[in-house]
Amino acid sequence: MSHWYARAAQALLQKTLSELLFEEALVALPCSEGYEVTLGSSVRYQFSAQQSIWGQLLIEPGTVLRNEQQASCPLQLLVDAQTELALTDIILANLIEETANTLAADTRLLEQRDGLSAGYLADLPYNAQQAYLDGHPKAIANKGRMGWGIAEHCAYAPEHNPEIRLHWLATRSEHLRSGLLRGWSPEMLLRQSLNDTDLEKVARQLGGDLRGWQFIPVHPWQWQHKIQTLFAAALAEQSLISLGELGDAYLPQQSLRTLGNRIRPLALDIKLPITVLNTSCYRGIPARYIEVGPEISRWLQSLCDRDPELCNTHILQEVAGIHYPQAQYQQISASPYRFHEMLGAIWREPVSQYLKEGQQAVMLGALWQLDNDAQPLLQHWLQMSQLTLSDWLQRLFDVMVVPLYHLMCAHGVALVAHGQNITVILQQGVPVAVSLKDFQGDLRLSDTLTPAHQELTSSAFQALDRLPDSHLIHDLQTGNFVTALRFLSAMCWQLFKFSEMRFYQLLSDSLARYKQRQPQLQREYERFDLFQPQIPKLCINRVRLQLGYDDSAQRPQMLRGRDMRNPLFSTQNNELSI
């Protein structure tokens, strides 16, 4: 067994055990060794752990025992716990494959980071840095990529730092759905990826004139495995014209399907469907938001431009979107959603386009990333900033959490703001702004109409979900607090000896200062109360355990566990000392 595989397996075992306990899929009881999980398979796991302010058991590395022997295999844990997890043999077998894929990718990440310090990783440019990040902290099998083998991982996965060249299609089809930001044209989008030589080649293929054509970039895996077969009729009839593999090389970001231009960092990012099951769903692009995506992102930026409270919040504009349906699946309304999301693209501004001198963009998920020696990247940014951790966190909360809460209270807009779709802008290591992106399905409106809602066109307004207050607030609590801050506060406690109680007291103070600045929103603070005693626990891993791997017409929804004690409530009532 390789050194890196053994390390990756042990880390994934600890994460799997910790997250399954957090989601109440397993139960741990105190014992002389710390904690123990006794399973119906006559297997007992024991480990040492500290309990976080969220009630999660943070397992100490290297302490997990299986029947009093050193445990090192997350796949065996799934087999041992089959009864408790209520897994059928079919679901268990698929879960083992998905977890094994994740383990292989995690092993590659450790190899990739070998010899690289936290400081080196922290200084990397935005796109390059993502090749070294661990990924989704909540999802156990966060790199499952079902259907990919080693060759596909090497060719297309971020941890392999690949160069991806896109396959291009041209169409004039009336079936196409598209949206375009004012001032842009299909040819301008094409020029974001192709040089003059490539453009001349395309023009010759299309009879010498690019006008009137729409262009669809296709991920090479998608072209090989889906488009050539399922869209064969459209290609044969030349409703779709294959232009071949053209243009600049791209680098995949953490989400797999969003690609950054390796040659021209200021060129638009491109988001493409890849019909593989990864993390929680098949990674396609729904048609629902395509035509209104540019309008919605422009509207959000307009809100930020006019509202002083949002002056350090920038929206990465969706410049264009395009969707081409498959003819037969379009006639089957309840067919699996993955068949309705196979061919399309979204062009989006890169964050590098807005960086000022001395600024750096980092994905929110990088803030709790460690190097191979368990040193946090955050330490490097702290040293650069010359701030205490307390002051640094206050700056982060002021530029990230407060704007998200203000959007909700002042404008009735909520974002599921997790580790991938928030980018933190650092100036000499200090958080000074955030960029927000990816609003297709992660942006919702309050069901109470606001003046901001009335600025949207009817089509854009109808495309967005409208939720009651009690649900809308979960987007901030679950999307940001539980999915991001839970891991940042735990890392600060374990590695910086910074109390989690103090962490959330700083967040409480930041929100209090905001409320003092905006007293006219008092009724909204009562509607969207972040200081309630309990908040819901939504469980991403239990969805996979329950629903398995069968097809469905809709994307899966998270399951609800028991409510959790709210750390913000606890800070106001001096309940905890963690």
Image (spheres, rainbow, N blue to C red):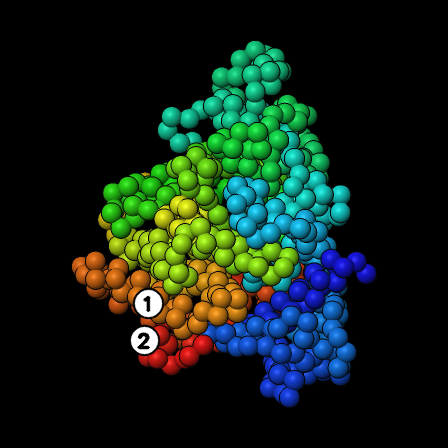
Height in image: 207 above or below 383?
A: above
Height in image: 192 above or below 491?
A: above
Q: Position of residue 292 (x, y in %)?
A: 41, 39
Which residue type carries mark 1?
Ser
Q: Position of residue 346 (x, y in %)?
A: 50, 37
In this rendering, would 517 be left or right of 386?
A: left
- To which quarter of the image does residue 291 belong? top left
Q: Helix or strand or loop: what does disc 2 sit on? A: helix
Height in image: 172 above or below 573?
A: above
In the picture, the disc for residue 572 is 2
Height in image: 143 above or below 158?
A: below
Q: Residue at x 46, y 33 (%)?
A: 320
Label 1 sits on residue: 508
Which residue type carries mark 2?
Gln
**Does residue 255 appear in this view?**
no
Neighbours of disc 2 within 10 Å: few (<14), some (14-19), many (20+): few
**Does residue 46 appear in this view?**
yes
Quick one: quadrant of the C terminus?
bottom left
Callout 2 touching callout 1 (CB < 8 Å): yes
Q: Position of residue 119 (x, y in %)?
A: 55, 50
Camera-nearest residue between 77 and 289: 77
Count of numbered circles on the image: 2
Residues at marks 2 and 1, CA–CA distance in whole angstroms:
8 Å
Q: Residue at x 75, y 48 (%)?
A: 149
Along the polypeptide, which appears first: circle 2 or circle 1? 1
Q: Residue at x 53, y 66 (%)?
A: 495
Camera-nearest residue between 385 and 512: 385
Quick one: quadrant of the N terminus?
bottom right
Which residue is farthest left? Answer: 520
